[in-house]
Amino acid sequence: MKRTFIISLIIAIPLMILLSKLNIPMPAVFGISFICIFFLIITPQLYFMYFSNNVENIERFMKRNLNQPLIALYYAMANKNDELIDKTMEKILKKYRKANHQAIFKTIFALYYGDVQEMKKFLHEIKPIQYQYYYKAIVSINEGYIKEAEEYIEKTKIEWMKSALKAELYLKSGMLDEAENFSQKAVSQAKGLQKYILAKNYEQEFSVK
């Protein structure tokens, strides 16, 4: 946060001086400066969270922003940090009060600890529906309902989700080569924080990079 504030000042002061010299009214100077700073600071964050394909760069970004609960959650899950998971989830559940938000975070928490029965309590409230299919498929795979899992996978339209589920399905069936192939595909299809967590998890499972 301190680093971001310093960068804001470095950008803002010269920009405001420049705009003032162009005889732009002061309210407009403040408005333009604010918009420019907003985009210069927020754009890199959005890029690493949702669009980056470089796992190492994403990790560096995450380590610099562990004060943000959502980023800390992804980092903790990817690196199997139980203490950080518990602390972060508590903050997230206090912040995101809507039923569908609570449902997805509680489902993620239960999945991390391998508690399938706990996951099942929240599945029907998860939105958007693609995420509901994804977690329902995970539950079906874990309970051995393969045909049901395949039906959910077929309904899933998000490519990395489909590949990740197929990897899990093949892994459950003991077909390791097929599982590894789909895990590689899932990592290549995902971006940002999702790419990072998949890459780290599959690294431990298959040494996928």
Image (cartoon, rainbow, N blue to C red):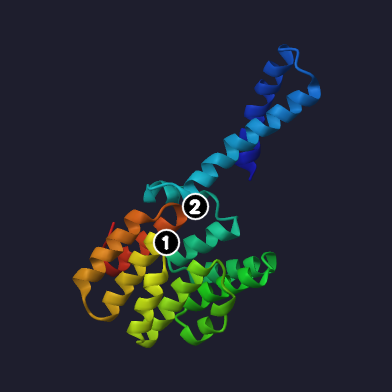
Q: Position of residue 142 (x, y in %)?
A: 38, 83
Nearer to me, 159 or 1: 159
Secondary structure found at label 1? loop
The label nearer to you, 2 versus 1, is 1
Q: Position of residue 88 (x, y in %)?
A: 59, 66
Residue topped by disc 1: 158
Q: Position of residue 108 (x, y in %)?
A: 51, 72
Q: CA distance from mark 2 to mark 1?
A: 27 Å
Say which residue appears at 37% left-offset and 47% top-offset: 54
- Callout 2 environment at 10 Å: few (<14), some (14 to 19), or many (20+)? few
Against 29, residue 64 (above or below) is below
Q: Earlier in the sequence, mark 2 or mark 1?
A: 2
The C terminus is located in which quarter?
Answer: bottom left
Amino acid tagged 2: Lys
Q: Is 175 positioned to the left or the right of 157 in the image?
A: left
- Callout 1 environment at 10 Å: few (<14), some (14 to 19), or many (20+)? some
Nearer to me, 61 or 178: 178
Residue topped by disc 2: 63
